[in-house]
């Protein structure tokens, strides 16, 4: 197990972790610590083909990491002396970080400073970094930023049309998110097609509870739907996506809603949840089958928004060589993929119904005559983080 990487996603009340052998891509162990700080927390860890669970109060993140590391050690899969690196998912790198970086005091300070742009995520990411720097001080740690793939968006795509001085002073621009996933998937598309990444024009749909799309040319992002925050763009499970900013003024002036209430509305009570009362596509589909009009409208709005961006990115790229679906919804809801791609035969986009409705893993869903490759590629952000961390650490030695 030489050369393993421990991948960490430290959230506000949870810790996701995987132990990965980055070269073959093997997952040696994975687990979740959740409900940190509540009366009863939970640890689940799968290693060596066995899943073990325990429930107890987990007072804070320090206790959570102690439990996770003890479980990995007891399972026989973790030896700190064989760790190449610890790779941390960090949500927001702002305009500062466009690549994975070795973590030092300055990097930790910057992650804290960028918390103003991601107040729900960066502080928790930093906590995980600080705890493991203290717990495993001899292991190099690497920060991999969710925004990094979109760091160099063209200025026309990254810039919002507001007062330039206000924007500069408050770091207002399009940052984009799900970048690790979009980069990983777009690179896998080139491998699957057997074509150089540099010659491909791609549209990638990362559709999960959070959803985003990206336009990629030659391996570089040209645009993405998420903006300064993950609220922008596509309709999501509980987030509104695109909305006229004037709606917020109206709700403030007429309904008396305050900033925190508006934040809660758009991030937690909108999207599919707001329209249909559910944010899971399985539940949404069941409601549609029962004739629920609100659920059907939610589906239609979701599809309409996705198709609108597909069309915009088709024009932006001047044509498209591959359209790819990934993440939980994108990989597992064939009817949604079919609806998004319906009627696009004049543009060389032709779905094969049988291929789309069956299969698993990496697969083609386009018809033999489709000029555009249509694919489903399961995302693997943990593997991408592990490989980025291992590459950076080995290159620094």
Image (cartoon, helix red, strand yellow):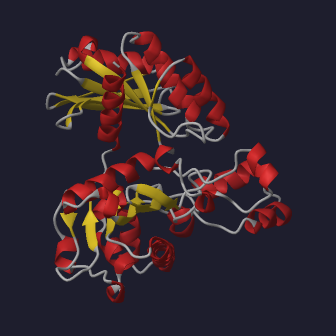
Q: Residue at x 18, y 73 (%)?
A: 355
Q: Horizontal and vertical percent for residue 67?
A: 36, 18
Residue 240 horizontal side relative to residue 337, left or right: right
Image spot of residue 303 (x, y percent): 45, 75
Against 144, is 238 above or below? below
At which x and y percent is residue 290? 38, 77
Q: Position of residue 113 (x, y in %)?
A: 65, 30
Q: Quadrant of residue 29?
A: top left
Q: How many marks?
A: 0
Q: Quadrant of residue 232?
A: bottom right
Which residue is situated farthest in the left direction here? 49
Rendered view: 113 above or below 274: above
Quadrant placement of the C terminus: top left
Residue, x 53% and y 61% (percent of image)?
225
In the image, residue 44 sits, relative to residue 341, either above or below, namely above
Observer-nearest of 212 and 194: 194
Q: Quadrant of the N terminus?
A: top left
Q: Residue at x 46, y 38 (%)?
A: 99
Q: Is residue 121 left or right of residue 141?
A: right
Residue 3 visible in the current orientation: yes
Q: Residue at x 52, y 65 (%)?
A: 235
In the image, residue 291 sits, relative to residue 279, either above or below, namely: below
| Nearer-the-camera pick, 54 or 360 | 360
């Amino acid at each position: 197990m030489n050369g393993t990487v421990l991948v960490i996603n430290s959230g506000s009340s949870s810790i996701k972790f995987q132990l990965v052998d980055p070269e073959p891509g093997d997952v040696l162990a994975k687990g979740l610590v959740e409900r940190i700080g509540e009366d009863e927390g939970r640890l689940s860890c799968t290693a060596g083909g066995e899943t073990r669970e325990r429930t107890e109060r987990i007072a804070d993140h320090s206790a959570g990491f102690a439990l996770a590391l003890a479980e990995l050690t007891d399972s026989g899969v973790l030896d700190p002396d064989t760790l190449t690196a610890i790779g941390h998912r960090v949500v927001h790198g702002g305009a500062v970080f466009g690549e994975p970086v070795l973590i030092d005091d300055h990097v930790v300070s910057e992650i804290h400073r960028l918390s103003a742009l991601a107040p729900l995520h960066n502080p928790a990411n930093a906590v995980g970094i600080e705890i493991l720097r203290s717990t495993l001080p001899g292991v190099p740690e690497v920060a991999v930023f969710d925004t990094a793939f979109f760091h160099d968006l063209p200025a026309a795509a990254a810039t919002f049309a507001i007062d330039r001085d206000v924007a500069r002073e408050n770091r207002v621009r399009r940052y984009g998110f799900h970048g690790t996933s979009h980069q990983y998937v777009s690179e896998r598309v080139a491998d699957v097609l057997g074509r150089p990444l540099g010659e491909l024009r791609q549209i990638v749909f990362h559709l999960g509870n959070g959803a985003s799309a990206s336009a990629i040319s030659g391996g570089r992002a040209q645009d993405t739907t998420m903006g300064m925050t993950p609220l922008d763009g596509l309709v999501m499970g509980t987030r509104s996506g695109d909305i006229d900013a004037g709606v917020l003024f109206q709700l403030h002036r007429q309904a008396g809603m305050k900033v925190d209430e508006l934040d809660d509305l758009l991030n937690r009570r909108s999207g599919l949840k707001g329209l249909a009362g559910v944010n899971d596509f399985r539940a949404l589909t069941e409601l549609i089958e029962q004739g629920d009009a609100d659920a059907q409208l939610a589906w239609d709005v979701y599809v309409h928004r996705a198709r609108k961006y597909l069309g915009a990115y088709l024009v932006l790229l001047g044509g498209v060589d591959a359209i790819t679906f990934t993440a939980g919804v994108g990989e597992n809801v064939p009817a949604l993929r079919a609806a998004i791609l319906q009627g696009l035969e004049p543009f060389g986009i032709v779905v094969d119904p049988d291929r789309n409705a069956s299969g698993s893993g990496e697969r083609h869903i386009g018809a033999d005559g489709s000029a555009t490759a249509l694919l489903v590629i399961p995302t693997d952000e943990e593997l991408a983080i592990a490989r980025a961390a291992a590459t950076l650490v080995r290159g620094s030695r």
